[in-house]
Amino acid sequence: MKLLPLVLSAVILPAVMPLMPSLRAEPQPPISLWPGTAPGDKGDIGPEKDTTKPSDGLVAGKPVIRLGNVSQPTITLYPAPRDHNTGAAVVVCPGGGYYILAMDLEGTEVAEWLNSIGVNAVLLKYRVPARKDRERYAAPLQDAQRAIGLVRQHAAEWGVNPQRVGIMGFSAGGHLSAAASCNFGRRTYEPVDAADQTSCRPDFAMLIYPAYLTMEKEGDKVSPELTVTANTPPTFLVQTEDDPIRCENSLFYYLALKQAKVPAELHLYPTGGHGYGLRPSKDAVTTWPRRAARWMRGLGLLKLPN
């Protein structure tokens, strides 16, 4: 008997949706997030570099860029093709344990997929590794808040609807996306310019095999920095039962969303592990991008402007 993935959803949606043909994303030049040194940084972590070693494992037969020592965070716009630009935009947060960034697996490849469904992608290169004497997410959250503000500031120029700006993250980037979804009442840094006068609340969030959402030793209580309220944005979650990060991360966060009456959808699959990105495999979890696209369509995010 063939097993089907468990789907827990606040709204029941069809499981399969055909994707548009793949369209190559043409990125714009990177934009520095901060006019000078990023807040709280000292510039003493060494040069930025790809830390990938020959012994590092492959994903779907391909290597992964593991970018480390990021002290000059940037955003890079991957604009959706003009003929089917929906006006939606997603800030993409690669994972890497707040130590490195999986820049292709969970970054550029994701941007290209978003473009293929008419969504503008904004790839966030946030600060790693975690800074000493600060919470591991503190500097990245500043970068994420600043990135969302910059997207809204440039909305007209970039063909983005400022009310369709979401965030998407993988693993630690999933935690960062959740943190941005729960911490938008005020900036966690002193405002710099007009971009910081816009809202930094994501309009929607997608958390793909997220990490650090709950505290295992405290009965999987949701982490204290993730205060879910009725104003937390609609959220889509994906994880597998054999994920070493533990699927309870997604399960208990989903329950917190449900209790706050936040529209949410969780897809829990039996196998697939962790860190697969969009790369195909034999596991059913490889279909998650179709489900995510269907979820975005259900929110009205993929409608072309009149």
Image: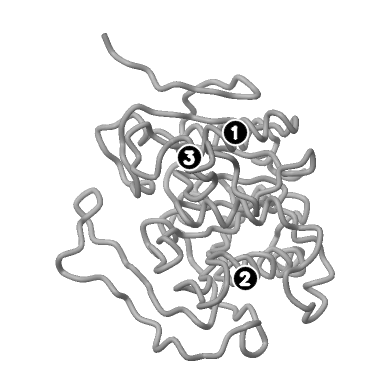
Whole-percent x, y for residue 306 in the image: 77, 43
In front: label 2 or label 1? 1
Label 1 element class: helix
Whole-percent x, y for residue 295 in the image: 59, 33
In front: label 1 or label 3? 1
User: Local crowd at mark 3 within 10 Å, few (<14), some, or many (≥20)?
Assistant: few
Whole-percent x, y for residue 143 in the image: 62, 70
Residue 143's tag is 2
- Amino acid under disc 3: Met
User: Cβ–Cβ below 8 Å for labels 1 and 3?
Assistant: no
- Amino acid under disc 2: Asp
Q: Disc 2 versus disc 1: distance between alpha carbons?
A: 25 Å
- Residue 102 in the figure: left or right of residue 186: left
Label 2 element class: helix
Quarter of the figure with the N terminus: top left
- Which of pointers 2 and 3 lies earlier in the amino acid sequence? 3
In front: label 2 or label 3? 2
Q: Is 129 located above or below residue 18 in the figure?
A: below
- Amino acid under disc 1: Tyr
- Which of pointers 2 and 1 lies earlier in the amino acid sequence? 2
Q: Disc 2 versus disc 3: distance between alpha carbons?
A: 31 Å
Residue bearing mark 3: 20
Which residue is outermost to the left?
Answer: 55
What residue lies at 30% left-to-right and 41% top-to-bottom? 280
Residue bearing mark 1: 254
Residue 51's tag is none
- Residue 176 in the figure: left or right of residue 24: right
What residue lies at 35% left-to-right and 49% top-to-bottom? 275
